[in-house]
Amino acid sequence: MILTSARLVEQAASDPAAFAELYEACFPAVFHYIQFRCDGTAAAQDLTAQVFEKVLRRLPDYRPSGAPFEAWLFAVARNTVTDWQRAQRLRHSLPWEALRRLRDPDPLPEAAALYSEERARLKAALAGLSERERDLLGLRFASGLKNCEIARVVKLDENHVAVLIYRALRKLRARLNGEAEVADGR
């Protein structure tokens, strides 16, 4: 979850030091979300930089009477990733670079083989989810946003977001357990 004050957001529009503070507060969540949505750390770094360039340019036009800052920020991030995916003609982007951070730094060969196998299973299971489902899971788990924050970003009711995430997780779990036909409702 990102904690920014309205005062900081207002100051950041004209004060480079305040923008740097806003950047430091928001960077980790935005970067993890983008890293979840695209394959590769380099691409995630480039896209995160693009997001903050857009934010810097557009911040003077931001009005808190509309969406909260965090919702506005993640809308910029989502749109940047979507535009990049269209340009790359990618249908599926998965969080493989993010998953690499989770492994043991010096695993035994058996553990490394198991990790590789689990990662491949997770990749296949995530590939079976829709773009919307992967997006919601990325906002929830890669960025650490709460359902109410996700609802503002995707412009849905908070309860609807909770149901969609629950269903996506249930489908992912079923795919991981070899129940793809059940998960697809067949």
Image (cartoon, rainbow, N blue to C red):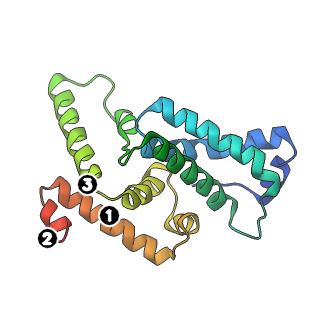
Is 94 positioned to the left or the right of 150 in the image? left
Residue named by callout 1: 168
Is 107 positioned to the left or the right of 3 in the image? left
- In the rendered image, the vertical position of residue 29 relative to residue 40, given as above or below: below
Quadrant of the image for the N terminus?
bottom right
Residue named by callout 2: 186
Image point (18%, 37%), residue name:
117
On the question of residue 8 being in view, the answer is: no
Mark closer to the chain start, 3 or 2: 3
Do labels 2 and 1 touch, CB within 8 Å? Answer: no
Real-space Cα separation, disc 1 to disc 3, in angstroms: 10 Å
- In the rendered image, the vertical position of residue 85 relative to residue 73, given as above or below: above
Quadrant of the image for the C terminus?
bottom left
Count of numbered circles on the image: 3
**Disc 1 on helix, strand or loop?**
helix
Q: Position of residue 79 (x, y in %)?
A: 57, 53
Camera-side mark, 1 or 3:
3
The residue under label 1 is which amino acid type?
A: Ala
Camera-side mark, 2 or 1:
2
Residue named by callout 3: 128
The residue under label 2 is which amino acid type?
A: Arg
